[in-house]
Each structure stands twice: as C-alpha cells, then as structure tokens.
Image (cartoon, rainbow, N blue to C red):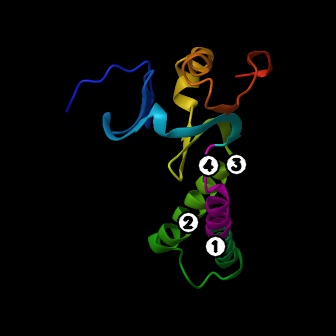
Amino acid sequence: MKDFKYDFVTDSFAVNSKEIHLLRNEEPYRIYKLETVSEIKIFYGKELKLWFVAMIIGLIMSGVGIYLLLQMVKQIFFNYTDAITLEHYIVTFPPLFVGLFLLYSSLRKTFVISIRTQGKELYLSLKDLIKNGQLEDFFKFVREHFSSKVKKMPVESTINLD
C-alpha cells in the first residue's frame, strides 16, 4: 500500500488537502477526491447515523432484561422452592447490559462531519479529533481547503468541548 501524508487522522478516516480517505485498520479502503465531494457539513449531533434503530433495540433489550430481573427477584422473595441457578444470571444480565449500552450509545452526541459525494453520504464522528485537541485546527483546515464545499459549520466561539 502507498504511504499517504495526512493532515488529520482518526480511527475511521484521514484527510489531506486533496482527498478524504476512509480507513480500516489504519489502511485506506476508499478514497474520495475533493472534486467528487459536493457538500460538507460539520455540526453537533448524534454520533450514530441510525441512532433511532439503536435506541429501539436498546429499549427492547433493556425491557426484556428488566422483566427477567423482576421475575428472578419475585422468585427469590416469594417462591422458596426453586433455587436461583447460574442460568438465571446468564439469561438475565446480558440483555439488560447490552440494552443499556445501546441506549447510552444512541443518546451520545459529538461533533460529526457529513460529506456528500456522488450520491453517497458519509457520516463520520470527530470524537478522536476532540480527544487529541485537534478540532479547532481541523475546522481551520476545512475552511482553508474545502471552503467552496462547506455548507454548514460551527463558529469557533460557540464551541464548548467540556
């Protein structure tokens, strides 16, 4: 694979002044040239593109987990004939914890970049840039190199990363 020079790198994408590279295991698997990009939006929004699907699945799994937990508590306090076995815990807690994690993930917000190119829309999280303290520099870079493509972008004075 070629060695590419990137100005900004996250786990899922990298950017230089001419291209946007989608990454897997730190290797580019898809490259979008600046000429093919029709629109760039950067905004504060949900980290997941299909957050409502994650929320629905999380609600269902959490509901099942809570129901099973209540059945187990009812059995412990009101029915002394059956013992609580390991299977009760194995069946009860994983759906509850996975459901709660999906609910948390679906409600999490961060800065995201939406890139429209050739009928496709890429929805990428900027949380790695926030972690590395590069978000302000990334905004300046996008304004300098992609200014004709930017349709929506936050003003630096309104950004609160705390």
Residue found at x 43% / y 25%: 18
Q: Which residue is mark 4?
A: 105
Q: CA distance from mark 1 to mark 4?
A: 18 Å
Give the percent coordinates (x, y) of residue 48.
60, 49
Amino acid under disc 4: Ser
Q: Which residue is mark 1?
A: 64
Q: Which mark is residue 107?
A: 3
Residue 40 relative to residue 70: left or right: left
Q: Nearer the viewer, mark 1 or mark 4?
A: 4
Residue 146 relative to residue 111: left or right: left
Q: Which residue is mark 2?
A: 95
Q: CA distance from mark 4 to mark 2?
A: 15 Å
Whether pointer 4 and pointer 3 mark residues with C-beta atoms closer than 8 Å, the reply is yes
* Mark 3 / mark 1, whichever is N-terminal: 1
Q: In terms of secondary structure, where does tag 1 sit?
A: helix
Region rendered in magenta: 47-62
Residue 143 relative to residue 119: left or right: right
Main SS, magenta region, reads: helix
Seen as rendered, the residue at the extreme right is: 158
Amino acid under disc 3: Leu
Q: CA distance from mark 3 to mark 1?
A: 20 Å
Give the percent coordinates (x, y) of residue 63.
68, 70
Q: Nearer the viewer, mark 3 or mark 2?
A: 3
Residue found at x 57% / y 31%: 127
* Mark 2 / mark 1, whichever is N-terminal: 1
Give the percent coordinates (x, y) of residue 153.
71, 28
**Residue 25 visible to the viewer:** no
Closer to us: 104 or 84: 104
Q: In terms of secondary structure, where does tag 3 sit?
A: helix
Whether pointer 2 and pointer 1 mark residues with C-beta atoms closer than 8 Å, the reply is yes
Whether pointer 3 and pointer 2 mark residues with C-beta atoms closer than 8 Å, the reply is no
